[in-house]
Image (cartoon, rainbow, N blue to C red):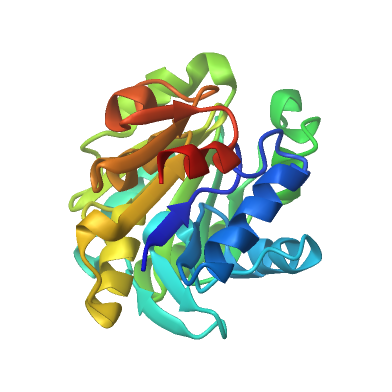
């Protein structure tokens, strides 16, 4: 039995419009029909990705969401929730307060995106994909309360003009103890617990099911897929990928159905 963990946006959904190439969908179904397991590993929340998978008739055994911070079985039961440590929370508030007038900021409580600050940025709010997730209002007081005290805080996100993304990423690195910053989209940087990634989610599922690493296949296109791709030799990066992703993968493909050639 083989286990395939795939990113969704930019990998199965190549153009960020929820269109799935019929060849990719047919391959996923063949993969499962042959007795293998399939899981989605995504930056999206469970309530954001599950309806899309169901609408496209994409079967799955697990969902790794929030870039690995929350892991679900096929019945949408949470089997892992990696919260940001309480000792990191004051650092977050100081950072958010210093940036709230300049950038669009938000955070996640388990499976809920929550606004912190809205800044009028046309590059974000005129983008059909990003505007679905970007904060619609300021939420400073409740945001401070949630960030300081809510045990389910697992992700912070920043919507940024593309020209400033690398500058902001460098600014964020090392600012919050026990956390890391990484780019998940050309306009998005996220922060989470330093040990959490999509590979972390895979290990959670691996511990439960006891399969070997040699039986893991992984596909992705983004910086948030790098740890997952490095975790197995059966790794596939999309030809249209973010920086450094190709160095983490063994193979390059244009569509995920091409994985079948390497089985």
Total labels drawn:
0
- The residue lying furthest to the top in this view is 163
Q: Position of residue 167 (x, y in %)?
A: 39, 18
Q: Is residue 154 above or below residue 191?
A: below
Q: Nearer the viewer, residue 62 or 37?
A: 37
Position of residue 42 in the picture relative to residue 56 (left or right): left
43 sits left or right of 161 in the view: left
Closer to the camera in the image, 254 or 179: 254
Question: Residue 119: x and y, percent?
Answer: 66, 35
Residue drawn at x 50%, y 86% as measured from the top left: 77
Task: State the image coordinates of residue 101 (x, y, percent, origin top left).
Answer: 56, 34
Residue placed most toward the observer, 253 or 71 = 253
Is 171 rendered above or below residue 132?
Answer: above
**Residue 39 visible to the viewer:** yes
Q: Residue at x 60, y 57 (%)?
A: 28
Image position of 59 with respect to 171: above or below: below
Quadrant including the N terminus? bottom left
Q: Is residue 162 left or right of residue 119?
A: left
Instruction: Tell me the residue at 37%/47% (across/down).
Output: 191
Which residue is drawn at the image coordinates 19% and 64% (left, top)? 87
**Res. 135 in view:** no
Residue 228 horizontal/vertical position (percent)? 32, 47
- Asked whether, in this view, residue 250 is left or right of residue 71, the answer is left
């Amino acid at each position: 039995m083989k286990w395939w963990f795939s990113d969704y946006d930019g990998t199965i959904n190549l153009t960020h419009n929820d269109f799935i190439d019929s060849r990719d969908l047919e391959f996923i179904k063949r993969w499962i029909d042959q007795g293998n397991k399939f899981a989605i590993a995504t930056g999206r929340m469970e309530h954001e990705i599950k309806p899309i998978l169901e609408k496209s008739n994409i079967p799955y055994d697990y969902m790794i969401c929030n870039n690995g911070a929350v892991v679900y079985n096929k019945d949408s039961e949470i089997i892992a929730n990696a919260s940001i440590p309480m000792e990191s929370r004051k650092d977050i508030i100081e950072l958010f307060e210093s940036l709230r007038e300049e950038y669009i900021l938000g955070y996640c409580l388990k499976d809920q995106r929550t606004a912190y600050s809205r800044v009028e940025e046309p590059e974000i709010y005129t983008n059909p994909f990003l505007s679905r997730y970007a904060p619609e209002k300021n939420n400073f007081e409740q945001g401070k309360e949630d960030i300081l005290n809510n045990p389910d805080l697992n992700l912070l996100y920043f919507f940024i003009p593309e020209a400033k993304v690398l500058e902001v990423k460098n600014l964020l690195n090392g600012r919050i103890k026990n956390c890391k910053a990484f780019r998940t989209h050309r306009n998005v940087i996220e922060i989470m617990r330093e040990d959490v990634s999509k590979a972390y989610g895979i290990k959670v599922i691996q511990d439960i099911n006891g399969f070997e690493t040699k039986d893991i296949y992984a596909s992705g296109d983004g910086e948030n897929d790098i740890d997952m791709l490095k975790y197995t030799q059966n790794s596939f990066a999309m030809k249209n990928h973010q920086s450094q992703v190709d160095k983490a993968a063994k193979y390059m493909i244009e569509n995920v159905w091409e994985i079948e050639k390497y089985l």
